[in-house]
Image (cartoon, helix red, strand yellow):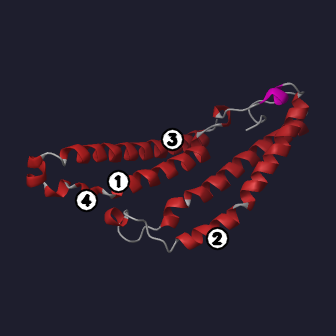
Amino acid sequence: MSSLTRLFRTSAEAVAAALMAAMFATFILQVVIRYTARLPWVAENMPFLQPANFGWTLEFCLAIWVWLIFWGNSFVVRVEDHVTFDVLYVSVSPRVRRIFTVITGLAVAIALLLSVAPTWDRLAILRLKKTATLGELFGDWIRMRDIYVIYIVFLVAVAGRYLWQVWNALRESLAGSDETGHSGGPA
């Protein structure tokens, strides 16, 4: 793995870790507020800890969860990490495996790329819709589109990963290699 690839992978993992840390910290804040707000001396001495001030935490956790899932599946989860049903795949020759990889890789990549435009159209509508409670934390500039735009990144990144697998399978075929390495395989 090249140093640039390693740097990108480490950076992507760091973003995922930061998202997880933000979600966990918000969850802990929810728990602390829920149980301390019931104590009379806290309510009297620290009015800013009223549960009504922390309605945004649920929506924030949900937004972070959406980003974490699509970010992680775009850039962190490797092909080897996926659960596959490969009984047929492992029972055929390396040449047929490469054919399987090319056909399935192209099918998945094309399907994902064809869904970008309709998804973008739907997200364009969401640019008008404000979030229910995140405006309290971030201001009115945050829109639902901003939360779900990570799905476009996911579509393009996963399509790119499948096209890379197709490229590696074709390159191996042209080289006449009988080894499938990491480029082949159902994903």
Task: Return the residue nearer the eye: 83 or 39.
Answer: 39
Q: Amino acid at mark 4?
A: Asn
Say which residue label 2 marks: 121
Say which residue label 3 marks: 13
Numbered mark located on residue 53 in the image: 4
- Residue at mark 4 to residue at mark 2: CA–CA distance: 34 Å
- The answer to whether residue 123 of the structure is visible from this angle is yes
- Residue at mark 1 to residue at mark 3: CA–CA distance: 24 Å
- Residue at mark 2 to residue at mark 3: CA–CA distance: 30 Å
Magenta-drawn stretch contains 88: yes
Q: Residue at x 24, y 48 (%)?
A: 33
Give the magenta part as a residue range.
86-90
What is the quadrant of residue 104 in the picture?
A: top right
Q: Amino acid at mark 1?
A: Thr
Q: Are marks 2 and 3 in contact (CB under 8 Å)?
A: no
Q: Is residue 83 left or right of residue 171?
A: left
Q: Are marks 1 and 3 in contact (CB under 8 Å)?
A: no
